[in-house]
Image: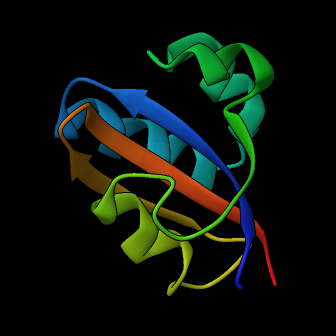
Amino acid sequence: MCVATARHILVSTEEICNDLKNQIEGGADFGEVAKEHSQCPSGKAGGNLGEFGPGQMVPEFDAVVFIKEVNKVHGPVKTQFGYHLIEITRRM
């Protein structure tokens, strides 16, 4: 079975999500941005979601984490919770 570790930032709008992505791509630290802006409780831990397998997250999240490039920030990804930036930190 495939497992992954990832960090994410959850915000309410696509506009905020794009702004934060630009900040990170400009050199801002993902974990610090997550602590400051994420609406998910994981934000306190820099957005760290720990290890999980397929089906443990919403389908839109899995579609990024188990397919897209590792160590890159992906998003905005819209789910029922809002808009996410997702950084896949490991997949095996």
Q: Is residue 91 left or right of residue 85?
A: right
Q: Nearer the viewer, residue 90 or 74?
A: 90
Residue 88, above or below 18? below
Q: Residue at x 51, y 54 (%)?
A: 56
Q: Quadrant of the C terminus?
A: bottom right
The correct choice, above or below, for 33 with respect to 74 in the image is above
Q: Quadrant of residue 32?
A: top right
Q: Quadrant of residue 36?
A: top right
Numbered circles on residues, count: 0
Q: Position of residue 51 (x, y in %)?
A: 78, 54
Q: Position of residue 46 (x, y in %)?
A: 75, 27
Residue 8 located left or right of residue 49? left
**In front here: 51 or 29?**
51
The residue drawn where x is 57% and y is 42% is 8
Q: Residue at x 40, y 59 (%)?
A: 61
Q: Is residue 31 left or right of residue 42?
A: right
Q: Determine whether, in the image, residue 25 is placed left or right of residue 3.
A: left
| Residue 45 pos. (x, y %) | 78, 22
Q: How is the image coloured?
A: rainbow
Q: Residue 67: where, in percent of width, then height?
A: 50, 87
Task: Name which residue lies at 70% across and 83% down.
Answer: 2
- Quadrant where the N terminus lies? bottom right
